[in-house]
């Protein structure tokens, strides 16, 4: 699979930064399911990390569900969420996000043995201004480390848990490699995040904390990022391992986003 087939499907991917994110042109909101489009989009998702789609009106629930079919089977019950929601999609609580650690860099559900593979969002209700979402490339984060840190991290295992997120409906722990390889692009990526990663195994507490603190700060490097200003009619779809994301809690009033999560397999070296 490659994204070279895009042109023959009438699709065009416009990079929005040098490292992460592409705006997708040429796709209909209710797709005609052109043969090959799901494969091409999946390749692009792994390549660019996050894809943005712009349509001319706010996305209805049936349109959102139909569009999701291009990206796979939605996960019926995404357990590590605070929302109870109307399955299969969840509407976020329109409360200030500071309480819920969605405004720190994270990948979703990495305390699960099989964390989500990807997710999609569209706005339901937006503040007048603010409340953007950012994504960070974990390819870029890995490639931005010196060879010394890369050798130290590659091969390490890391404990992920819900200890910092006591408001989630369920608790969980899982051990994953600190560095994983994308099955589509074969590129390596950093796989630790400040919400779920608790400690690096095989190190003292002090060593683990110091290394994780450095990595969490490293993820917060603007060259790895793309920022989306939401407006009605926008859909964002991201690969959960290739990227991390965070909201920006700089708004007043309600901000409600509708979300679907796609099931994933076990992250591998
Ligand atoms: Fe999230």
Image (cartoon, rainbow, N blue to C red):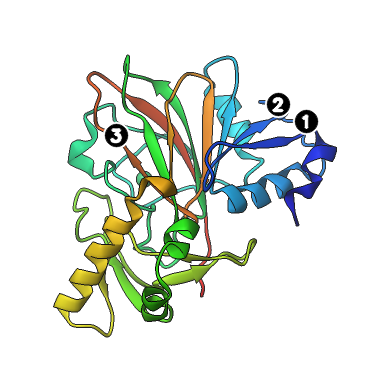
Of the 4 image quadrants, the one containing the N terminus is bottom right
Q: Which residue is mark 3?
A: 248
**Image: 79 above or below 160:** above
**Image: 151 above or below 243:** below
Residue 135, numbered circle? none
Quadrant location, ligand no. 1: top left
> Callout 3: 10 Å neighbours few (<14), some, many (20+)?
some
Q: Earlier in the sequence, mark 3 or mark 1?
A: 1
**Residue shown at the point (56%, 14%) measured from the top left:** 57
Q: Secondary structure at mark 3?
A: loop
Residue 262 seen from this side: no
Q: For the residue with label 3, is its CB less than 8 Å from the closest atom of ligand 1?
A: no
CA–CA distance between discs 3 and 2?
29 Å
Q: Which residue is mark 2?
A: 28
Q: Are marks 1 and 2 in contact (CB under 8 Å)?
A: yes
Q: Are marks 3 and 1 in contact (CB under 8 Å)?
A: no
Q: Nearer the viewer, mark 3 or mark 2?
A: 3
Q: Secondary structure at mark 1?
A: loop
Residue 40 vs residue 207: left or right?
right
Q: Secondary structure at mark 2?
A: loop
Q: For the residue with label 2, is its CB less than 8 Å from the closest atom of ligand 1?
A: no
């Amino acid at each position: 699979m490659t994204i070279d087939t895009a042109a023959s499907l009438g699709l065009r991917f416009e990079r929005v930064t040098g490292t992460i994110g592409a705006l997708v042109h040429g796709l209909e909101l209710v797709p005609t399911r052109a043969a090959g489009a799901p494969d091409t989009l999946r390749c692009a998702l792994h390549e660019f990390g996050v894809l943005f789609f712009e349509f001319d009106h706010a996305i209805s629930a049936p349109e959102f569900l139909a569009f999701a079919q291009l990206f796979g089977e939605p996960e019926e019950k995404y357990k590590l969420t605070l929302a109870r929601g109307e399955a299969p999609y969840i509407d976020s609580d329109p409360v200030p996000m500071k309480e819920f650690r969605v405004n720190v860099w994270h990948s979703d559900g990495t305390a699960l043995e099989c964390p989500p593979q990807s997710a999609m969002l569209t706005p339901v209700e937006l503040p007048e201004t603010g409340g953007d979402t950012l994504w960070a490339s974990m390819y870029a984060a890995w490639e931005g480390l010196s060879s010394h840190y890369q050798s130290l991290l590659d091969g390490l295992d890391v404990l992920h848990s819900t200890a910092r997120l006591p408001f989630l409906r369920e608790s969980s722990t899982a051990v994953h490699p600190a560095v994983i390889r994308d099955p589509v692009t074969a590129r390596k990526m950093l796989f630790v995040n400040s919400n779920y990663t608790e400690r690096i195994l095989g190190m003292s507490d002090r060593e683990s904390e110091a290394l994780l603190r450095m990595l969490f700060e490293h993820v917060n490097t603007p060259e790895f990022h793309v920022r989306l200003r939401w407006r009605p009619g926008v859909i964002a779809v991201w690969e959960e391992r290739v990227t991390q994301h965070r909201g920006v809690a700089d708004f007043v009033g309600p901000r409600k986003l509708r979300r679907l999560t796609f099931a994933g397999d076990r992250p591998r070296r």
